[in-house]
Image: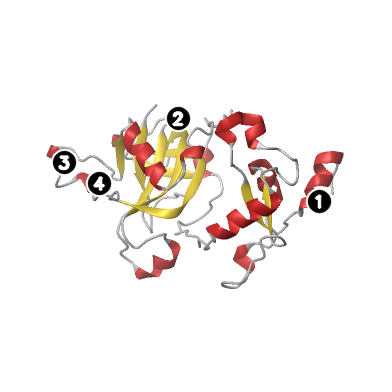
Amino acid sequence: MSYTIITENDTSKWEDQTGFQYHFPDRYLKFLQPGTKVIYYKGRLKNSAFKNHRLSSQPHYFAMATIRAVNPDKKSSKKDYYAAIANFTSFDQPVHLKKKDGALFEKIPVNRERNYWRDGVRQISASVYKAILSAANMEMLDDFPVPYNSNDNQDWETIGWEGGKKVVYGTRYERDEELREKAIKIHGLNCMACELNFEAFYGQWGKGFIHVHHTKPISTLGGKQPINARKDLVVLCPNCHAMVHRKKGELLTVSQLKKLIRGRTSL
């Protein structure tokens, strides 16, 4: 198992897409292979227009993922590659470069002290990887499997874009951790659609794990609004949560999802 930091800039001339694919030169190929565990990193904010689209203006780690496949960029004359990303999970809070004791998470070799941060891809040890995840409270997601796709050898890196290149960025909405805890206290840890309980299924490893779903997407709230943990939040397993959000512009209710599960029929 290998572990690597990958840098994402606020702007890019490549057809990168956060959590889907990552473009890199061939000198980093040895660090980015199928199965490699990666942590996303952003450097210091240089353009204030992107301030609200980051977790922090300072250099920080902001997500974890796994490399699913690597293929050549057929449009490049410089032996560049695209990595397909799997299991992308963003952090709820930024993890800055230094630990609480002031030491850097990444171990900088003595002969690289002056130019270490110039590398967009940096291999790290398992202990550094786990330390960053621990700081982000993400240990439970560390061992998600890499989904296999028989079409990974095809031109997946060109799918979804036509014409000129563009910069793509998204908005991150604030979440209240206390509301999540209240929702779990009220609704419990069984998925409210399929009734899966992670501790019952996975044992101690699954204890306390569940997703909390907003019945009304927070992106539609128009700013900070009061949320009722009993009425506005439900608990779902990741599969049911994904099905609720599967179609853009069409959000299923828990009742509709239960109908699909029990009847295996269309809505």
Image quadrant assignment for residue 181:
bottom right
Judged left or right of residue 207, residue 244 is right
Figure quadrant of residue 260: top right
Kindly indicate whether the residue at mark 3 contacts the one at mark 2 (C-beta within 8 angstroms): no
Kindly indicate whether the residue at mark 1 contacts the one at mark 2 (C-beta within 8 angstroms).
no
Give the x, y percent position of residue 219: 60, 65
Residue in the picture at 67% in, 56% down: 248
Label 2: which residue? 35
Of the two numbered discs 4 and 2 on the same chain, state the one appearing first in sequence.
Answer: 2
Q: Which mark is residue 104?
A: 4
Residue 262 locus on image (x, y percent): 84, 40
Of residues 179 and 68, the one nearer the viewer is: 179
Q: Which residue: 67% across, 65% down? A: 228
| Disc on the earlier residue, 4 or 3 | 4
Q: What element carries label 4?
A: loop
In the rendered structure, the answer to whether residue 99 lies left or right of residue 83 reads left
Compare marks 2 and 1 and give the one earlier in the sequence: 2
User: x and y percent of residue 56 in the render?
Assistant: 37, 61
| Amino acid, disc 1 | Gln
Assign a secondary structure to mark 3: helix
Q: Spatial distance from mark 2 to mark 1, Cα to Cα?
A: 36 Å
Whether residue 144 is visible: yes
Q: How far apart are marks 2 and 3 (CA)?
A: 27 Å
Kindly identify which numbered label has been placed on residue 112: 3
Q: Nearer the viewer, mark 4 or mark 2?
A: 4
On the image, numbered disc 1 is attached to which residue?
A: 256
Q: Residues within 10 Å of mark 3 (few under 14, many from 20)?
A: few
